[in-house]
Each structure stands twice: as C-alpha cells, then as structure tokens.
Amino acid sequence: MVGCAWAALGCDGSTAAAPPGPSNPGAAGSSSTVGGAGSGGSSSGSSGTAPVSCNLPAPGAAPIRRLTRFEFNSTVRDLLFDASRAGDALPPEQKGNGFNNDAASLTTSRVLVDGYHNVAASLAQQVTSNPTNLAKLLTCDPAAQGEEACAKTFIASFGRKAFRRNLTDAESATLYRVYQAGKEGSSYVDGVKAVVEMALQSPQFLYRIEHGAAVPGQTVFRPTSTEMATRLSYLLWGSMPDEPLLDKAMAGQLDSKEQVLAQAKLMLDDPKARDVVRFFTGTLYGIGGVDALERSAGLFPTYTRSLGPLFRQETERFIDHVIWEGAGDFATLFNASYTFVNGPLATFYGLPGVTGDAFQRVERDPSRRLGLLTHASVLASTTPGSRNNPVVRGKFVYEELFCRQVPSPPASKSAPWQ
C-alpha cells in the first residue's frame, strides 16, 4: 500500500491533465485516459508499447472527484470535531473498477442532493449546540470585537478549511450574506450555523476541483500547491489538509517533487494514514461486511455471530502489522505463517494456548493456512450463501487481485448441464 501511494503520485508528483475545455472535452467527469502508462503517451493506436517517459508526461484526464462517504465522514471529523459518521446516512456510492471512489461512477442524484441537505443541517445544528465544539470553531469574541468582525473572521478561517484553500472575495461575500440571513431575527450563533450548513453543501466542499497551473513549454497543467495538498491529504489521510499542510501549500512549498515526497513521508506517520489503509484493504478484500455475517448452524456448527467482528479484526491487525511493522510486501501478505487471534478466535481455528479477549500473534500450521487468503474473513466474504463455492472464490482472486476479467460463456455454446 505504501508503494502504491508513491505510484499514485505519478512520476514527479506534479503533473495533471489540461483542464476541461474545447481542446480537452473529456477532462471533466471522465475516467478515460489520454496516453498514459500503457501507451507511453501515444494515442496513435500502435500495437507497440513505448516506455513511459517522466520528462514527457501524458497523465490522462483529471476528473472532478466527489467526496465518498468515507472521505465525507473523515473530513467532517476534522472540520467539525464530529465522529458520528453522519455521511453513512447518504446513499452508497456505485462501485467502478472495484472501488467506490471511481470518479466516473460518482454521479449525483436528486436523492443524494436531498441527503446532503439533511446531513448538513443536522451537522450544523450539532456543532453550534455543543459548547465545547463551538468554542473550537469560533476563535473570536463577538462581545469584545463585534459580531460583524467576528463573522468575517470565522468565514475566512472556516472557509479556508472547508474549501481547502483561501476563499475568493466572491465566496467570502456570499457566505457573509448567508450569515446575515441566518442571523436576522435570531442570534450570532444562528448566523454561524447557516454558514456551516451552506458550506457543507457547496461544490467547493463536496468536490475536489483542480484548475492547475500551466507548465512552460508543455500542454499539460500541474496542480497548484494547494491542489497538491488536497491530493496528498485525500490520498494518504482520506480527509482534508490540516492547518500545517495548508500553510505549506500557501507558502508554495509543494511545488517540487522533492517537497511532495518529503511531505508524503511525514503524512504516513500520522494515524489517519492507517485509517485509509484499513478502508482500502477492507474494500479490496471485501471484509467490511463480515461483522453481520450469518451462517446456518446446521452447516457451520462452530460459527456464532460474535465471530464475525473477530474475523475482521484478525485481518485488519494482520495487514496493519505487515504494512507498518513488517516487510510491507505482497509475499508476506499472502504467504505469512502467522496471524493475530484472541481466545474465541483461536478456539474457532483450533489453535491451542490462547485465552482472553486480547489479540496476539500466533504461528499457524503452514501446511493448512498461509497468508491473507486463508483468513476466515476472506473465505467467508467470498462465499455467498451458506455453502462454500470455490468457483466464486477463484473468480474473486482472478478479478480483484489479478485485475483480470472472467468472460461470459460464448453465446453459441450450451452449458454442460443443459
């Protein structure tokens, strides 16, 4: 995963496709690529594959990305000090390429817009009715400095965090009018609540919009420093840039590949990076739903519903160890002879000598179980229904891990059972 993070930054972490326009109509909301790694920057359709050149980048389209529910929840946690996961009430994303953050699949429906409206109103009410969180949000005393001055200070500070950059004059003026409308006939805090509610529904908050900066002598654009800060934060933290990262961006300290790499290494030391890895691997290996796993007692007499969450925790702890403390390679991930279990899970596996609720590292019989694919979480999540299905499991390995596709049977051939 760490290696994937560096690869996702591109050759020098600093190029982006040209912004959408007449000469680049596919750049907005499109997942199509122009050139790219598979063609070495050529779109001629030649069967030969030229090597990728980092001096002549062909990064492809740079679609506008909407925050996923995971990113929405993480951003709200850091912006409003709210860990209630209010975004879970929003309609689920449609998966594309096996993941729920595929830009081309993140369409916006009326149901989703209504959901944003309801969630924004609820979050604004919660943060302004909680004295502790409200004090963190408001750093200006309206009684001492005046409500108008404090409102403008709040809009500049909160807007910078929510929009992940400094506000334009037009944006500041719009949010101030929202504040005035919310405050009218009510109070200063009601005006603040209106600003929060409005900001959480704004395209500048819900979408990651990049305009880029021109690169002399090239047709591609590169992300600005603030856009790179947002790229880094959502790649490695799944959330908005924090204040130190925004400060670096505003100072132009994310313009070179050396600066980007140094900042990325620092960000990987933050606990939020582990949250992203868990979410990524949970989606990739399909273990997120095993908490509510049900199985027939007649077919699986040793299984109880209390084991589902333990299956997930075993895999999460194992992956965490391999990536953050171990070798961090796929060989260990798929071939390790050890895992992490507690007493109930050890009993389920038939592993002796483990008691209590705390998870601990144990060795397994390498002739029976090796690595991630023999974890109960993966075996259960790739077995729909109540019976084992090796064909479905093999399809999962072939498609999700090898990135291949199992074709449909030829239309002219009859199935052997027909």
Image (cartoon, rainbow, N blue to C red):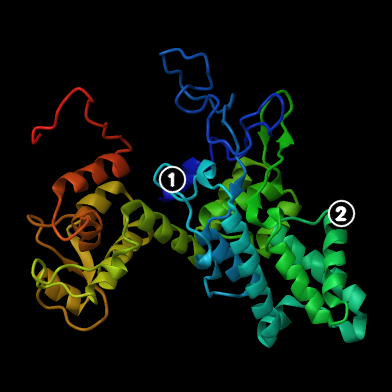
In terms of image quadrants, where is residue 47? Answer: top left
Q: Is residue 383 left or right of residue 178?
A: left
| First along the sequence among labels 1 and 2 | 1
Mark in front: 1 vs 2: 2
Report the disc number at residue 202. none
In terms of image quadrants, where is residue 55? Answer: top right
Taking the spot 77% from the left edge, 69% from the top edge, the residue there is 195
x and y, in percent, of residue 145 in the image: 91, 81
Q: Which residue is mark 1?
A: 4
x and y, in percent, of residue 193 in the image: 75, 75
x and y, in percent, of residue 320 in the image: 35, 62
| Label 2 element class | helix
Where 67 falls versus 76 (above or below)? above
Disc 1 marks which amino acid?
Cys
The mark total stands at: 2
Q: Which residue is mark 2?
A: 170
Taking the spot 63% from the left edge, 59% from the top edge, the residue there is 241
Disc 2 marks which amino acid?
Ala
Q: Between 190 and 361, which is closer to the camera in this rendering? A: 190
| Label 1 element class | helix
For the residue carrying disc 2, how many other residues have a C-alpha within 10 Å: few (<14), some (14-19), or many (20+)? few
In terms of image quadrants, where is residue 383? Answer: bottom left
Where 67 falls versus 125 (above or below)? above
Q: Are marks 1 and 2 in contact (CB under 8 Å)?
A: no
Q: CA distance from mark 1 to mark 2?
A: 39 Å
